[in-house]
Every structure is written in C-alpha cells, then in structure tokens.
Image: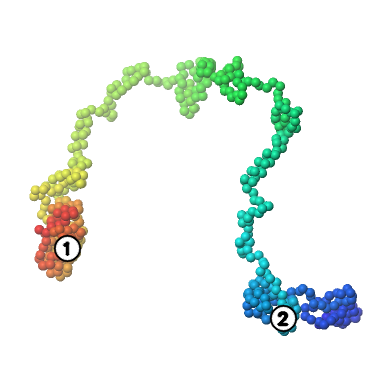
Amino acid sequence: MTLMISGGGGGGGATALSGLSDVTLGLLANGQILQYNSGSGQWENTALTGQLTYQGSFDASTGTPALSNALKGDFYVVSVAGTQFGRDWAIGDHLIVNADMGGVIDNSKIDKIDNTDAVSSVNGATGVVVLDSDDVAEGAANLYYTDARADARADARIAASNMTALADVSYTAGAGIDNYVLTYDHAAGGWRAEAAASAPVDSVNGATGVVVLDSDDVAEGAANLYYTDARADARADARIAASNMTALADVSYTAGAGIDNYVLTYDHAAGGWRAEAAASAPVDSVNGATGVVVLDSDDVAEGAANLYYTDARADARADARIAASNMTALADVSYTAGAGIDNYVLTYDHAAGGWRAEPAASGGGSRPNVYTQSASFTIGDGTGTDPGAVTAAELERVYLINNGASAVTVTLPAISGNVGAGFKLQIKRLGTAAVTIDRNSEDIDDQATNQTLSVQYSSFTLVCAGAGVGWYII
C-alpha cells in the first residue's frame, strides 16, 4: 500500500507515506490502520483490534457459506440451527472468526457467542410484550394497594392520632384545660379549648336534655300573637268595612254626582266592570209582565214560522211520509221492483237478514231457459251463452252441448247461495265426442267421481241435494 500526499507550497510533487520522517511502515495487510506509537514517536501500521465485519447469515445445518478463507473479525448470525466445528449452533447465535483462516478451517479460530440466554418470554407472554400491574404477581416487599390495606393503615393512623392533628383544631392538653369546651373562633381560624360560659342554660321552658320545642310549647307573648280564625275574621271584616268596590281589581269608576243612576256594566274591551248610563229604552214589561219575569212556552203565543207541536200535526206529517214511501224503505225488506218479479211473494230469509221477493213455492217461477254451448265451461261463469250466476228466481237450467267431434267438459257450479237444495240442471250431448260432467268437488250419486255422456244424444238430469251432500242423477 502506498499513500501519496499531494502538498501545496513551494516544492510541488507527491510524497509517499513511507517517505515521511515520522511514519514507519511494516508488512502491509488489508484492514490495517495507521496508529501512533508514543514509545517510538512514529506512526505505524497495525491491525484494528476488535473490529468485526458482518458477513451475513450462516446455515449451521450445511456449513454454508464456507469459512476456509474467512478473515479475522468476520462474523455471521446463525439462521439455521445445526452442528459445525465441534459445536451446537442455535438460531441467533453469533459465529466470529478470531484469526485469518488461510485456506484451511481451524476450529480454534472460530468463537461462538451464545444467544440462547436471550429473553424468550415475559410472564409467559412472547412477541411484543406489554404488561401492566395486573400481569405481574405481587412480591413480598412491594405490595399492591387494596381497600382493606388502606383502611387498616388509616385506622392505625387514626388510633395513633388525636384532635390536635386536625388543621382546624388547636389546644394544649393538660390539667389547665379541665372542663374546657371546644368553641369555634372565626378570628383564630378554627376550634379552640375555652372555659364554658359562666351561666349556661339549665332548662328550656322547664325541659332539660336534648330539648325540641314547637309553638305549642311556647306561650304567646304580648306583641307576637298566634293566628286564630277569630282574629283573621275580625281583621278581614275591618279591611272590608274600610274598603269599597273600586278596591276590586275588575271594577273601575269615579264616585260623584256625575254617575247618579249609572249602572255597573261589564266591558270586555276595558277589562272589567264600569259605571255607565242605563240604556235609553229599557224593557218595561214582557208579554204584559213586569218585575222579575219568568216565562215558559205557555206564556208565548205561536208565531207564523215557529209552530208548536201537536199530535194532529205529527200524525199528518207521518201519514204524508208513509204515503210517499214503499216497502223497500223498511230496514228488513229488500227487492228490486220490475216485471222480473211478477207473481213473486215476500218470504223471510234468515240468512239474508229479512224479507225478500221470491217465486211462490207452489207452482211459481218461470220456465227454464235453454242454453247451447259448444266448448268447455263452468255453469254460471258467463262463458259463451251461459247467462252467469244463478239467480234466486231460477229453479232449473237446460244446457245443450253441441260439441261436434270435440270432447267437452262441463263443470258443475259450486253449491252455495242460489245454487242449493232443489235446483235442477239438465245437460244433453248433441255431438259425436264425449261430454264429461266435472263434479267440482261435490259427490254425484254419493260418488266422488265425474260422470260422462258417452253416447250421442244421451243426457243427465241433476238435482242439487245441498252443500255437503252433492248432486243426484234422476
């Protein structure tokens, strides 16, 4: 190694470090430093004692990287545990080379710093540990606070103390203050021991000890009198006798000759009663009566508009109302007048809640209508020529099924309302295809099966036996 020094000044040029008079260089090696030796008075090259150079991690299971050319001061941190160089290595241990290997590994040139004694857990916790006092057990000397310990300490302190320890109590104990009492002294700033008053109270109204009095225990004096109803009444009477109406909050007038014959009249706008002149035309009599007049309707003649009640007038009014009405005005009668109910009779129908117009039971009603259908339908649904729901006037219906070569299904109506016991249906097949009678959940001849008109021009006559019973073929 050659260190050249470039100087300024007069000479110019460059000077080698070894050419300096106070520098002595020996055999040079990598990593050496220049160090002053006071014994020789010279700067000398020498190795850096104790210098470590981190070379990375070391796998102790495979021995890599190889250390045959490692130099003094090289150190590694073990990343994989294993056995090398006659030692057991754990993760985190430090491997330090204490001398140049020179191409051959020498176990004596390898030092181990064992890091297995590092903290592995704190109170059983690992990782980034954060503790508070709840996580640390109580020792023998440094005890935790408890209310019981604080109470015991306070009790002991109180037992060892006395009143003079209090900031606002001051006295010197001794025979000299026998029978003294503690008296508050504001000027002195607290309680002080003082002689008791020379003439303390011995009794109150004859009572001793802890005395509690009310007004019943204290006699009435000459000035401060107790309340009585008689005294209050007398006081009120005197106040009233000395007053007049203008003392009332809602009465206002100025007495004097100027208001003679005035009357008190309430004036809402003015907010009370005021003295005003009487009306210029007061009532002199009512229907010939004077004074305090009390009338009833017998004292007042009937006018032209407001007429009095009479039975004759009420009867005439009722007769006129009845004559202008009809039976449908009654709450329990209901029908629609028209040619459709000719020869009907009023029949009471409990389910409907009153009287209804219906065909007479003996031979009443009208001839059934005949309806021709060509496709599937439900009786009463208004499909095709079907007229819709069965009315109260209908006793039966006749259906001709002109279905040609197409099969048709005729669904019976639900048994409810006007389709009830006695209602009759006649269904005849005209076409060449089958006509099925769908029972619509009701039995036919006590059977839960549909019926079929399988022969051309065949027919069924069905009579309703009522809900829950079904239909019968007759």
The residue at 87%/80% (across/down) is: 24
Q: The N terminus lies in which quarter of the figure? A: bottom right
Compared with residue 447, is residue 17 higher up or lower down, i.e. above or below? below
Q: Which residue is mark 1?
A: 450
How dense is the environment of label 2, judged by Cα within 10 Å: few (below 14), some, or many (20 and up)? some
Compared with residue 148, is residue 170 higher up or lower down, i.e. above or below? above
The residue at 27%/25% (across/down) is: 302
Residue 21 in view, yes or no: yes
Q: Which mark is residue 383?
A: none
* Foreground residue among 474 and 269: 474
Q: Which tag is nearer the camera, tag 1 or tag 2?
A: 2
Colouring scheme applied when the structure was drawn: rainbow
Amino acid, disc 2: Asp
Compared with residue 44, is residue 203 higher up or lower down, i.e. above or below? above
Amino acid, disc 1: Asn
Q: Is residue 328 left or right of residue 26?
A: left
Residue 145 in the image: x percent, y percent? Answer: 64, 49
Residue furthest to the bottom: 103
The residue at 67%/41% (across/down) is: 156
Residue 328 in view, yes or no: no
Residue furthest to the left: 363
Residue 436 in the image: x percent, y percent? Answer: 16, 65
- Circle 1: element type: loop
* Mark 1 and mark 2: Cα distance apart in space: 111 Å
Residue 280 in the image: x percent, y percent? Answer: 42, 20
Q: Which mark is residue 106?
A: 2
Q: The C terminus lies in which quarter of the figure? A: bottom left
Residue furthest to the right: 10
How dense is the environment of label 1, judged by Cα within 10 Å: few (below 14), some, or many (20 and up)? some
Callout count: 2
Question: Which label's residue is closer to the chain start, 1 or 2?
Answer: 2
Residue 294 in the image: x percent, y percent? Answer: 34, 20
